[in-house]
Every structure is written in structure tokens, then in C-alpha cells.
């Protein structure tokens, strides 16, 4: 079981560690600063932290294995916008919204998804970054819109552990895109997704799809799960085709989803009441779990607040460890809960942290 976890919050990066059978808080890094994303790199034990310092801009730091100090590395930066461009988007990195490592077959390679919708690649552990112009320059980008923010952003990067050249990225709003050659070329990958917030004749148009979060099962890489603005979807073929999950559930709206590390049929979602009312259903926090590929769902509540609860779980604020049983969840109002039995029951870690943007196991 993973023995360490990281919580990226509005006021710092908090560590959790399991000691003597209990989870306890450890060091706090960048106290007072917004940490938008953290990446523990399993290939070399390093840890990356992305910060959004407002007036001082976006920053990226790395802590090497065995070290207690952080080193500032390069920030993914857009090239200057051509003077004759009619692109209304500001070519400036507003935030690192996703950060992922390639597999063991590509040591040192990192991927970063940013606002306003650019995908960046580093081949030297963050010392330098390259904007993937092959995706940035697709004509469809002009039709992408803001989802969680006023500008489009890439929030999900799914690397195939069998072959790091195979990628799927998802954005709000602009659908999902797939590459088989390490980002040299891209194909739209939203077939089967449906958007209910546009006229019916546009419902399947790729550029209007708003997948809130897409995750891949590491041990069954062809299995992908998506929490979409208009429902829940699953792909069994690496994202080529998506099927809507229509089984009865507490709610089909939400932001977070986590995939079991080895079982392609098991995933967890955190439902919210509706787009217009982003609070738990009946003000009672719950996690839903499917173990049969989305045909049925269990509603898991034990240990979670069931009265006057208005916590929302962001896209990246639900994670499952490699054992497939330990889950961590953080909320917009600073609540943190952990389960060590697949979500059957939860223990409260904190109710007073800053808003939690993302959680990850080390």
C-alpha cells in the first residue's frame, strides 16, 4: 500500500504519511501559495509542484529523491503570438492544470496541460518545455471554449503504460484527443460522447464536449472512464469509442473519477446535485462505485458527512492508490477523507484545510 500522499491546496502543498497504522500530516511546502498540481514521479522518486502565484506567474519546482530542498525548473511557456494572428486567445500560460510522467520507456519525459489549452512536453525532467504545435494548431482549437475557467484548459493526460507514445488528453471544453506517435499527430477521440447543453443537432460535435475528467486504468490501459458535464462515459478500446453510462446512480453529474489500478470494471465517482447546484445530493456527501463496468452502482456514505454538507470535489481531488483499496478525497471547503477498504468506509483526516485542488499518492 502507498505510504505517502500529497494534497495540492490554495495555501500550500501538504504531505500525508502512514505511520504505525495511522495517517498523519507531515511537512507543508510552499505555505501560503496556491499549488495547482503535484506529480510524484515513480520512475526516479522525484516530486514536482506547480504553483500559480498570480502577479508573479506560474512556477514549477522539483524535489529530487532523498532531498529536502526544492529546485525551480522551467515553466512551460508559449511562444510569442504572431503579430498578424487573429486568434482571440492570449498565448500566455495562466496555469498548469495537469502534470503527468511518461512510462519507464521514456525516462525524463513529462507532460503538462495548461490554460489556455496547450499541451507541453519536457524530455529533461522539466529543464525545458516544448509546446505541442501539432495539437495547438489543429483548426478545431478555434472552437474550444472555457469549461472550468474562462479559457480552455487541458486537465487530463492519459499515458499508455505499454507504450508512452500512446496518449489521450481531454480538455474543458474541446473533447478528447488521441495520439499514437508521441504527439506528432492527433485524432479527435470523442465518438459516443454527448453534450446536452447545446442544440440537439450539435450534441455530438467534438469541440463542444466538456469531459470534466478522464482517467485510465494502469493495469488495463484500454479501459478509460470519463465524468462529463452531461453524464458518465466509459471506453473499452482506448478512447476510440465511448459508451454513456445510463445505469441508475445518485447523480450523473460531477467532476471527479478514479479508475481501479488493475480491474477495468471498477471505478469511483463523486456525484454532485447538478450543474446549476454544485453541492452534494441532499447535502450529504457520497461516493459511488461500480465493479461491473458501469452496469450498477453502490452508494458509499459510511464516515462521510450526511447533514449540511456542501463540499464539492474537484476534478483531481479523488485518487486511488496502487493497492486498489486506499482512496483519498479532498474538497473545496478543506475537508479530507481517506478510505482503506475501497470506499466502504471513510475516516476524516481534516475539515479545516485550505480548498483542495488535487490529491495524489506517492
Image: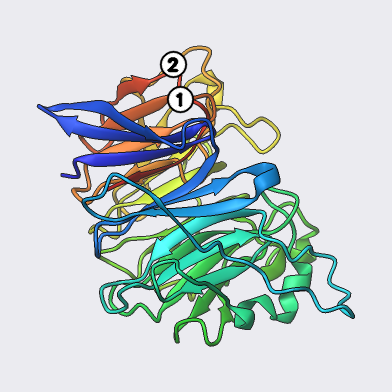
Whether residue 212 is visible, yes or no, is: no
Check disc 1 and report its element: helix, strand or loop. loop
Query: What residue lies at 71% left-to-right and 62% top-to-bottom?
Result: 92
* Foreground residue among 104 and 47: 47
Count of numbered labels shown in the rendering: 2
Tell me residue 74's x, y (percent).
Answer: 51, 63
Residue at the disc numbered 2: 306
Q: In this view, does 113 lie above or below 5?
A: below
Marks 2 and 1 in Cβ contact (< 8 Å)? yes
Against 107, residue 112 (above or below) is above
Q: Residue 357 appears at what percent x and percent y?
A: 51, 39
Where, by quadrant of the figure, is residue 277 drawn?
A: top right
Of label 2 and label 1, which has the lower sequence position? 1
Indicate the position of residue 346 as horizontal and vertical percent values. 29, 26
For the N terminus, the image quarter is: top left
The x, y position of residue 85, in whole percent, is 86, 77
**Is 17 on the left or on the right of 168, as rendered?**
left
Which residue corresponds to mark 1? 285
Residue 250 can be seen in this image? yes
The residue drawn where x is 24% and y is 63% is 44
Q: Which residue is drawn at 52% across and 87% down?
A: 184
In percent of the image, x 73 and y 76: which residue is there? 140
User: Where, by quadrant of the figure, is residue 336 drawn?
Assistant: top left
Is residue 78 found left or right of 319 in the rendered image?
right
Amino acid at each position: 500500500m502507498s505510504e505517502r500522499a500529497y494534497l495540492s491546496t490554495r495555501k500550500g502543498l501538504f504531505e500525508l504519511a502512514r505511520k504505525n497504522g495511522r495517517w498523519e500530516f507531515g511537512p507543508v511546502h510552499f505555505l501560503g501559495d496556491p499549488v495547482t498540481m503535484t506529480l510524484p514521479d515513480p520512475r526516479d522518486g522525484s516530486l514536482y509542484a506547480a504553483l500559480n502565484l498570480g502577479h508573479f506567474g506560474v512556477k514549477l519546482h522539483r524535489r529530487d529523491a532523498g532531498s529536502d530542498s526544492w529546485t525551480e525548473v522551467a515553466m512551460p511557456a508559449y511562444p510569442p503570438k504572431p503579430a498578424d494572428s487573429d486568434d482571440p486567445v492570449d498565448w500566455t500560460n495562466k496555469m498548469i492544470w495537469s502534470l503527468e510522467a511518461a512510462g519507464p520507456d521514456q525516462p525524463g519525459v513529462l507532460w503538462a496541460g495548461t490554460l489556455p489549452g496547450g499541451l507541453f512536453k519536457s524530455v529533461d525532467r522539466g529543464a525545458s518545455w516544448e509546446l505541442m504545435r501539432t495539437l495547438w494548431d489543429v483548426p478545431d482549437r478555434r472552437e474550444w471554449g472555457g469549461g472550468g475557467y474562462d479559457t480552455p484548459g487541458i486537465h487530463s493526460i492519459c499515458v499508455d503504460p505499454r507504450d508512452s507514445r500512446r496518449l489521450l488528453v481531454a480538455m474543458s471544453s474541446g473533447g478528447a484527443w488521441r495520439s499514437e506517435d508521441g504527439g506528432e499527430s492527433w485524432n479527435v477521440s470523442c465518438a459516443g460522447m454527448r453534450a446536452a447543453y447545446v442544440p440537439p443537432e450539435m450534441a455530438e460535435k467534438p469541440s463542444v464536449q466538456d469531459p470534466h475528467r478522464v482517467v485510465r486504468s494502469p493495469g488495463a490501459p484500454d479501459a478509460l472512464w470519463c465524468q462529463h458535464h452531461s453524464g458518465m462515459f466509459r471506453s473499452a478500446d482506448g478512447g476510440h469509442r465511448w459508451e454513456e453510462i445510463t445505469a441508475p446512480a445518485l447523480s450523473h453529474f460531477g467532476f471527479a473519477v478514479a479508475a481501479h489500478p488493475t480491474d477495468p470494471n471498477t471505478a469511483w465517482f463523486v456525484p454532485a446535485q447538478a450543474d446549476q447546484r454544485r453541492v452534494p445530493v441532499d447535502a450529504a456527501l457520497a461516493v459511488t462505485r461500480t465493479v461491473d463496468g458501469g452496469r450498477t452502482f453502490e452508494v458509499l456514505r459510511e464516515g462521510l458527512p450526511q447533514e449540511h454538507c456542501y463540499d464539492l470535489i474537484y476534478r483531481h481531488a479523488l485518487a486511488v492508490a496502487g493497492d486498489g483499496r486506499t482512496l483519498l478525497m479532498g474538497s473545496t471547503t478543506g475537508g479530507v477523507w481517506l478510505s482503506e477498504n475501497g470506499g466502504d468506509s471513510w475516516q476524516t483526516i481534516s475539515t479545516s484545510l485550505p480548498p483542495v485542488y488535487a490529491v495524489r499518492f506517492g
